[in-house]
Amino acid sequence: MARTSEDKATSILNAMKQKLEAISGLSSDKAKALLKMENMENATRKKNFLPDERTSMITNAETDKILCRSFQYIVALMEFNLHNLRFQINHYLYQGFKTAMSQTFSSNVLEEADWDKLVEPDPIVTKRLKEVEEKIVALREFLQEV
């Protein structure tokens, strides 16, 4: 039993050394190969819910472990569902808002707006507008003479 824990410790130590070498070295190929190897090991590793060496009758400790894992699974599932639900609701609201605005908003603003209340007349602008109109008239008269 002590030998297996030593083997696990050395394999963990070797894996950490390889990771540090890949990270500290500037070789992207080495880092990619390491990640690929880790992903392959994770995919093929057997994951145990309960230990293989157990009695035929379920014990209280195993029951507690099952309940704890089940609770963790349910919580993770609920968080995942809440995340998806938030995304779906936000997407639905955004698309509905966008559709409603594109259909009627601009025409309603232009047709139903009371521009006299929205815009106050500025005497400087009206004076400047009269000056520009006088210049236009003067330019037209000058062009007719030419």
Image (cartoon, rainbow, N blue to C red):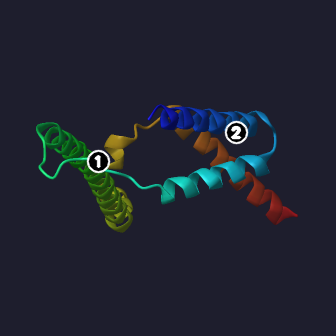
Q: Report x, y in % for residue 141.
A: 76, 59
Whether 27 is drawn above or below 99: the answer is above
Residue where numbered disc 2 is placed: 18
Numbered disc 2: secondary structure: helix
Q: Is residue 108 visible?
A: no
Q: Describe residue 145's horizontal placement relative to residue 100 as left or right.
A: right
Q: Report x, y in % for residue 72.
A: 24, 42
Q: Please report the residue visible at 34 percent of the width from the left and 51 percent of the height from the top.
A: 48
Residue where numbered disc 1 is placed: 53
Whether 58 is drawn above or below 124: the answer is below
Closer to us: 93 or 122 = 93
Q: Please report the residue visible at 60 percent of the width from the left and 34 percent of the height from the top.
A: 10
Q: Describe residue 106's horizontal placement relative to residue 30 as left or right.
A: left
Label 1 is placed on what type of residue? Glu
Closer to us: 146 or 66 = 66
Q: Is residue 134 visible?
A: yes
Look at the image and tell me in which quarter the N terminus lies.
Answer: top left
Label 2 is placed on what type of residue? Gln
Is disc 1 surrounded by few (<14), some (14 to 19) or many (20+) residues within 10 Å?
few
